[in-house]
Image (cartoon, rainbow, N blue to C red):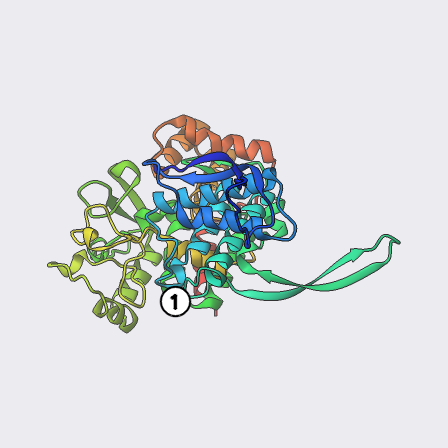
Amino acid sequence: MNKLTLKRLDIFTPISKDQSISNEEFDINNFLHFPILTHDDGSIWKHGSLYLLSKLKNYQKPSPKTLDSIATDLKHFKEYCDNENIDYLIAPRKVLRPTYLYRSHLQQLLREAKISPNTIKRRMSAIVGFYEYLINIEGVEFKFPLWESGITSISYKDIYGLQHIKQVKTKDVSRVTKKLNNISIDKIEDGGKLRPLSYKEQETLITNLQKINNTEMTLSFLIALTTGARIQTIFTLRKKHFEKELNDCDDLIPIKVGYGTSCDTKFQKIQNIYIPKWLYYKIKVYLNSPRYQKRKDNAKHIFKNDSEQYIFLTNRGTPYYVANDDPYRADYKEPPNGATVRQFIFQKLKSIDFSFHDLRATYGTNLFDKYMEQVQNKEITLSTALINIKERMSHSSLEITQRYLKYRENNKIKQNVQFEFEKKLERLYFEK
């Protein structure tokens, strides 16, 4: 992991009898505990340190504590960019703007209960200030804007208790919704702290996807909801995985993924995911559609065997996620890793607060509720249900599967499970 070192120096302007120092830019002679950001090799991070130094030109000087807080936030941002191979001085495409990528990273930390909403506000405020300095003072130019500005109205009371309304400028990268502030601490630990979506939220999600009418996102989200597959698995599926001829007796179509299959899994573990027949069929239809053909024709990288092409491509023909064994992986300066999908959630699905990984836990709770109905009807035992869930979700241990049982018990959620939820998803998808 790339790290910066935060050092603190006492800055003094020397004045002697034999030397007169003219200080036109700064109206102070000293500043104690000034933060300096240095790389592992001892070199100073130029832009970050110059921005901190510019703060001393303000009429109202920041306290050492305030400046130290800003430096710490800049340090966190720069380390994130270094570790993700993000050039913070370049915004080559709208979806790859460093401000949005970093905000998505902070949102994920919030969902995992590692930081608070106030931390997001503070860190993004520091980053916005940093970029405003780069643009206005250093003259750095970016191909795409680093945020979208707007105006909103806020109400407040004055010292006499009277209500007032004033308009303030806002930036979307600094926004933290009330839903984020009220995130439940009740989550499931399954490769991260995950929050299952309620049935109502799932219905809202599918309805919103239908309105947006992005075929690739709709199909990929449905795979997540009906298989529990992770983002790297879903977006590295290939055409060859959907070449099977369907039979009337098929309800679930198994697809082998993991090492040697061209489809990534966590730790490249070999496993099966099971796609409902109706969804498998819709994907086969999509792969023969003009929309997919156009995206495939735009692809820069052509595989020797056409069946190795990804099923989900952007309109530029780029995969949303590049597999570990992709022969063209080295050609990418920044191999796609699902950032476009996360940005889609942030920009288009604002009415629901969730991460793509939460859909895995959502599938797990749907599956759990389905099996619990059978347990209650004494069709199967609880142990059999847990073993089946463990197999379908490819958990490494039964202990992880039991966390879904504990989640339901802790939350005491009354679920409407008189139907198989996959059937309702199918009906919602085909509703006009």
On screen, residue 301 versus residue 23, left or right, reads left
On screen, residue 365 versus residue 217, left or right, reads right
Residue 174 place in picture, x, y as percent: 56, 54
Above or below, 358 against 288 in this view is above
Q: Which residue is the extreme one toward the front?
A: 18
Tell me where residue 95 sits by quadrant: bottom left
Q: Which residue is the extreme one toward the right?
A: 160
- x 26%, y 65%: residue: 317
- Assign the N terminus to one quadrant of the image: top left
The answer to whether one can see residue 319 in this image is yes
Q: Which residue is the extreme one toward the left?
A: 304
Query: As shown in the figure, which amino acid type bears the numbered disc 1?
Result: Lys
| Frontmost residue, 129 versus 160 | 129
Count of number-bearing discs: 1
| Frontmost residue, 223 versus 37 | 37
Tell me where residue 185 sits by quadrant: top right
Q: Secondary structure at mark 1?
A: loop
On screen, residue 92 versus residue 74, left or right, reads left
| Frontmost residue, 226 versus 351 | 351
- x 38%, y 47%: residue: 81
Tell me where residue 90 sits by quadrant: bottom left
Residue 148 place in picture, x, y as percent: 52, 64
Label 1: few (<14), some or many (≥20) within 10 Å?
Answer: few
The answer to whether one can see residue 413 in this image is no
Residue 356 place in picture, x, y as percent: 43, 49
On screen, residue 256 versus residue 417, left or right, reads left
Residue 362 place in picture, x, y as percent: 47, 45
The residue beneath circle 1 is 143
